[in-house]
DNA sequence: GTCTATATGAAGATAGAC
DNA sequence: GTCTATCTTCATATAGAC
């Protein structure tokens, strides 16, 4: 039992669970501690601050994005590579058994709370590189919006269809389909306008 | 000086401003009071609770949605009426000089904080009627997602393009274009599958 | 209609014993 | 590695004077 079952990981799991249910601000360290059967003070042994708990979770997601960015680095934007970017992004973001998926939801639903943290992690800048691979900065507004939306739908796909009875895989596939459909519509209005 | 310039309205304006900047949870009544040059207690004369401040703002938006719902009531879903629904929704949601627009942003960014409130106002149920006018409940997952996205992009259009230097009107037009484009793609996979 | 003053509680965080 | 005990700060909210 070297790596697994560590208290640190348990804290992360419970925190992610509660943050997701109640929101980051409304979840207190006391609650997290109670769910684990320990005291608040115990948490401070593992994490210096409340924010460090969530930032520790987001680091893994950031690293996954970096892998995609590294792949992208030497590619030229073509319809093929653009579609492949969306596929790889989708796979990177939602892969392992739910943690990343829940984190994406958390980031989207708690933007004010995580605003400074997000700034520190340069999540926006990472995404900007991806956006600009899909559309040039001078493209029409509608296309700029489509580019952003094609990533956003990958984040949202899963929980926007909460009620629908389908497997997680089916939801992901649907989200990717919509995302690629948006890509298809890029440049539809001003075809090849430089 | 009968209707306007009331303290109540000033409180709403400042609250909306600060909630938007810092988030609902992170904004205290003390801050709101200070920005107005009054004391916390003064706020309690006009609003029983903090939540009542924001719910008073959301009521107007709810009523606007109800107007659209009333228009929709006796319509049959056709490509024309569906497009018209999106146009009317866009107009209703973003119309007057920024308040509604900022509220939409607020609702999207502060979901956990406003979760109970939103439940009470039946915002989800209202939207469900709209979704189901665009797609039948049994439609493919991708189409269900497109239907939801076509409304969401109207909410987001404005602030997803924050950096772009364009007028508010141009951004709204772009958002509507993307929204209608998603509508076009409905049923693309399984054309007329009942 | 707005204020002062205060009640009450919970939050995040720390010091130091075990 | 976890505890008890405590600090500090700030929140929402109320009572009652002006």
Image (tube, coloured by chain):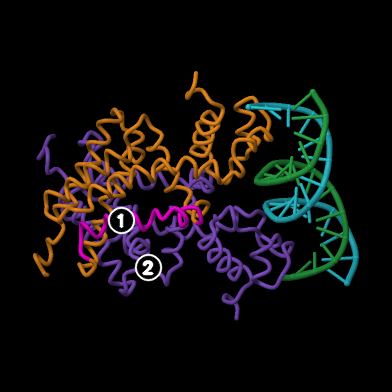
Chain colours: A purple, B orange, C cyan, D green
Check disc 2: other Cα within 10 Å, few if <14, some if 14-19, many if 20+.
some
Name the residue tied to disc 2: A95
Q: Residues within 10 Å of mark 1 (few under 14, many from 20)?
A: many
In x, y percent, where is residue B85?
Answer: 21, 47
Q: Is residue B70 left or right of residue A60?
A: left
Q: Which residues are magenta?
A: B116-136
Secondary structure type for disc 2: loop
| Separation of marks 1 and 2 at Cα, in angstroms | 16 Å
Image quadrant for the C terminus of chain B? bottom left
The chain that hosts pointer 1 is A
Of labels 1 and 2, earlier in sequence is: 2
Mark sitting on residue A128: none
Q: In this rendered view, identify the residue nearer to me: A37 or A65.
A: A37
Between B142 and B78, which is closer to the camera in this rendering? B78
Question: On the picture, is A69 further left or further right than C10?
Answer: left
Residue at the extreme top: B1
* Furthest residue in direction front, as rendered: B2
| Residue pointed to by mark 1 | A153
Which one is closest to the eye, mark 1 or mark 2? 1
At horizontal 57% and vertical 76% (from top left) the residue drawn is: A4
SS class, disc 1: helix
Q: Position of residue A67 (x, y in %)?
A: 37, 57
What residue is at 64 percent from the left and 58 percent from the top?
A28
């Amino acid at each position: 039992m070297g790596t697994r079952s560590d208290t640190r990981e348990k804290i992360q799991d419970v925190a992610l669970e509660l943050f997701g249910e109640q929101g980051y601000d409304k979840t207190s360290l006391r609650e997290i501690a109670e769910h684990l059967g320990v005291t608040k003070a115990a948490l401070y042994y593992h994490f210096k601050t409340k924010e460090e708990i969530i930032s520790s979770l987001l680091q893994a997601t950031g690293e996954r994005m970096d892998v995609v960015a590294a792949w992208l680095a030497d590619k030229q934007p073509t319809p093929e590579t653009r579609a492949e970017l969306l596929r790889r992004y989708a796979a990177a973001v939602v892969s392992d058994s739910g943690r990343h998926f829940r984190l994406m939801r958390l980031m989207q639903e708690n933007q004010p709370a995580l605003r400074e943290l997000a700034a520190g992690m340069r999540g926006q800048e990472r995404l900007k590189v991806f956006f600009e691979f899909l559309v040039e900065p001078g493209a029409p507004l509608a296309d700029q919006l489509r580019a952003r939306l094609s990533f956003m739908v990958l984040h949202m796909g899963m929980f926007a269809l909460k009620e629908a009875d389908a497997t997680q895989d089916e939801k992901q596939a649907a989200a990717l389909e919509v995302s690629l459909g948006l890509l298809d519509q890029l440049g539809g209005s001003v075809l090849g306008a430089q």
